[in-house]
Image (cartoon, coloured by chain):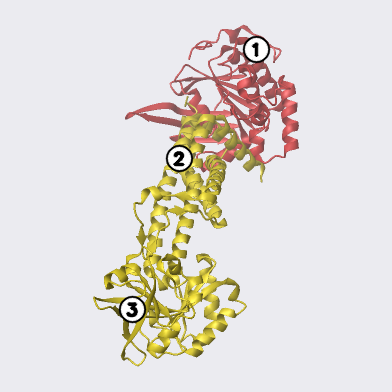
């Protein structure tokens, strides 16, 4: 088990984090006392059934919502004391997001979507274009720069979304069901891609997913049940991106595609 | 422009273009609103200017020079002496004043009584220099019978039609004018009716008599004097500068020569113009408020439909201020583009009306008079660059005001909640 012990060099650290929602007068504990430490460069999957708190925990780590109790650190910075403006700045500079529904901005081209965060950070145009073109070429979407999201397939859109998340070289990428809306072949390709980026660029990836294919490739699997960590296991990843294989990952309990 | 602002502007413009139908419909509201504003302001300006022009020609001019106190008392005790009049003539010839002056009329005005064998009627006696008055005043052109006064006239009068009827006289008949002379004595003068006018203003037609200035001076023992000098300028916009220049040139006679603009000299006309102007602005404000509400609705709907998108951009690191700026820019771009088109449409409509004006004859069965001036039922627009500046100001204000609430809503979006929005 990974605990909360460790230095401030952790990519992510949470300490007794709770998130309680109130719905029609009833309090719902979405996240209950989670203690985590994720080191830089980890490839971590948060798994669990629907309602287990995966997405909420991801949102807490990304500073998209504030914990009811407890503390969250990202790249050594404590989030709960930050203002909205500081949180936005942290997300801009340290965190990349990949969403289930791609969430590309429909009025921007693929290139403009990919360079969105860099533009907000004030990187000059030449540098932005250089990074995006290099990444697009590597991801197999070169030539699609001027297309708008509506003219791209689901897989292509998710590649652009991944490019948008990693092109600014953040410390952490948070991906919520990134393979849920694509077919299995595309899904494998996307997982390969993210595993490569994790390995080669050292970017920390934290996924929330049901997808067993993604779970099999995780080097650490954190199982959530009813908002609490039920298991936290280091694993030997399986798959072409890692050049490894193993039967245990395929037999991962409690998670299968489309279970949501 | 920074890359960040350029990005926000790009998002704003493309979002407007993406929602083509909604943007066009909203833009049309703005086009119609601003088009109407520009056209109706031009018509109001034209109508008011015509109104003022008629008023000042029938009355005291754009600017009037008179002895302090005359406006309130209207007696010969308050008159401009010969040397004051000479100073006034020199002032009107001054290089700083002369270019603005289109004409002037020297007058001796006082209250009196007009009587015949059949009746006596209180009147305003206006003694004039006939040739100068003919160029200045509209009254000579309102002749219905006989002729207007000429320089050679002595004991002649030009009277209103209703006054003539009340006195039961005709052209060529004689009437007696009675007034208080410079010494305070009651003095009478027999004059013959040379001509009759009908101005359409009952007070004028019932109670104004023009006689030659030379006759009045002898009759009332005020040789070389006058009670006022009425000055005509190019238009009412020239009044302020001309008044200031005259005050400067006549500064050493400020205790003997007062400079009054038409608003002070004709407060009833000024009040009527202001009232009409106020009503116009109320109408404009209602029109623009409706347009602004249409834009608020469009932008707010756009914001609400794009809740998820705003959540995404915030998740990607856009600040609340950026989100607010993006929405404000959408409002400003939409209002600016449609507003500029609206101003163009308004100018086009105004241009079309320059030649023939807008004919309101069908609204009036008879002459319509207010504050001593008869309306011309055909109104011609008048255009000033300031109208464009005002309109651009309105465009900006509407853009800002109509975007404020949607922008506020957009900045209040909770990111995590917004991501669930379908």
Which comes sooner in the sequence, label 2 or label 3?
A: 3
Looking at the image, residue A212 lies above or below residue B350: above
Tell me the residue that label 1 is attached to.
A238
Report the chain shown in yellow.
B
> Whole-percent x and y of residue B264?
41, 73
Residue plotted at (63% across, 17% down): A155
Q: Is residue A13 visible?
A: yes
Tag nearer the camera, 1 or 2: 2
| Residue identified by numbered label 2 | B296
Distance CA(mark 1)–CA(mark 2): 55 Å
What distance separates the C-alpha of mark 3 from that of mark 1? 126 Å
Instruction: Compare residues B363 and B287 and report the one nearer the observer.
Output: B363
Q: Which chain carries label 3?
A: B
The vertical placement of A110 against B198, above or below, is above
Q: Which of B232 and A43 is in front in this view?
A: B232
Residue at figure coordinates x 27%, y 70% from the top left: B166
């Amino acid at each position: 088990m990974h605990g909360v012990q460790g230095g401030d060099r952790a990519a992510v650290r949470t300490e007794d984090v709770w998130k309680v929602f109130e719905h029609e007068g009833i309090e719902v504990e979405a996240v209950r006392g989670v203690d985590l430490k994720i080191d830089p460069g980890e490839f971590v999957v948060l798994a669990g059934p629907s309602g287990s708190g995966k997405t909420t925990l991801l949102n807490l780590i990304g500073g998209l919502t504030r914990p009811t109790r407890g503390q969250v650190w990202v790249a050594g910075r404590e989030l709960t004391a930050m203002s909205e403006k500081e949180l936005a700045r942290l997300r801009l500079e340290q965190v990349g997001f990949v969403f289930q529904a791609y969430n590309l901005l429909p009025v921007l081209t693929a290139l403009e979507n990919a360079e969105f965060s860099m533009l907000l950070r004030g990187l000059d145009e030449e540098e932005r274009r250089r990074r995006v073109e290099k990444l697009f070429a590597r991801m197999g979407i070169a030539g699609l720069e001027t297309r708008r999201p509506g003219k791209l397939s689901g897989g292509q859109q998710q590649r652009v979304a991944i490019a948008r998340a990693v092109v600014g070289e953040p410390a952490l990428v948070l991906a919520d069901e990134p393979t849920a809306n694509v077919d299995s072949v595309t899904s494998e390709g996307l997982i390969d891609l993210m595993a490569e980026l994790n390995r080669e660029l050292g970017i920390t990836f934290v996924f929330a997913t049901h997808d067993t294919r993604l779970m099999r490739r995780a080097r650490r699997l954190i199982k959530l049940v009813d908002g609490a960590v039920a298991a936290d296991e280091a694993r030997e990843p399986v798959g072409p991106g890692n050049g490894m294989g193993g039967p245990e990952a395929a037999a991962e309990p409690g998670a299968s595609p489309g279970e949501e | 422009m920074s890359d960040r602002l350029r990005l926000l502007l790009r998002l704003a413009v493309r979002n407007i273009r993406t929602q083509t139908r909604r943007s066009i419909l909203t833009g049309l509201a703005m086009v119609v609103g601003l088009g109407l504003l520009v056209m109706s302001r031009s018509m109001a300006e034209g109508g008011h200017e015509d109104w003022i022009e008629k008023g000042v020609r029938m009355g005291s001019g754009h600017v009037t020079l008179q002895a302090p106190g005359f406006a309130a008392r209207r007696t010969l005790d308050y008159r401009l002496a010969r040397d004051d009049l000479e100073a006034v003539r020199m002032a009107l010839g001054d290089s700083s004043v002369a270019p603005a002056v289109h004409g002037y009329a020297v007058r001796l005005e006082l209250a009196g009584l007009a009587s015949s064998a059949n009746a006596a009627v209180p009147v305003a006696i206006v003694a004039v220099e006939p040739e100068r008055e003919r160029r200045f005043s509209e009254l000579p052109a309102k002749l219905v019978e006989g002729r207007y006064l000429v320089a050679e006239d002595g004991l002649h009068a030009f009277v209103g039609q209703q006054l003539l009827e009340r006195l039961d006289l005709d052209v060529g008949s004689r009437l007696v004018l009675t007034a208080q002379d410079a010494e305070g004595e009651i003095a009478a003068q027999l004059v013959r009716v040379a001509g009759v006018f009908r101005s359409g203003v009952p007070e004028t037609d019932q109670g104004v008599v023009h006689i030659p200035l030379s006759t009045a001076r002898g009759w009332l023992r005020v040789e070389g004097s006058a009670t006022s000098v009425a000055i005509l300028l190019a238009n009412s916009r020239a009044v302020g500068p001309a008044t200031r220049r005259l005050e400067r040139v006549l500064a050493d006679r400020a205790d003997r020569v007062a400079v009054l603009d038409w608003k002070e000299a004709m407060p009833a006309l000024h009040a009527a113009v202001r009232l009409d102007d106020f009503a116009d602005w109320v109408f404009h404000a209602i029109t623009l408020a409706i347009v602004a509400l249409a834009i608020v609705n469009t932008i707010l709907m756009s914001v609400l439909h794009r809740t998820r998108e705003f959540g995404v951009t915030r998740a990607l690191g856009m600040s609340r201020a950026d989100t607010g700026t993006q929405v404000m820019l959408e409002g400003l771009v939409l209002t600016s583009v449609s507003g500029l088109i609206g101003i163009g449409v308004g100018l086009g409509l105004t241009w079309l009306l320059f030649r023939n004006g807008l004919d309101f004859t069908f609204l009036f069965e008879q002459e319509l008079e207010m504050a001593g001036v008869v309306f011309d039922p055909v109104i011609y627009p008048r255009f000033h660059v300031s109208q464009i500046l005002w309109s651009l100001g309105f465009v900006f204000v509407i853009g800002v005001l109509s975007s404020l609430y949607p922008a506020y809503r957009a900045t209040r979006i909770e990111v995590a909640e917004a991501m669930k929005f379908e």
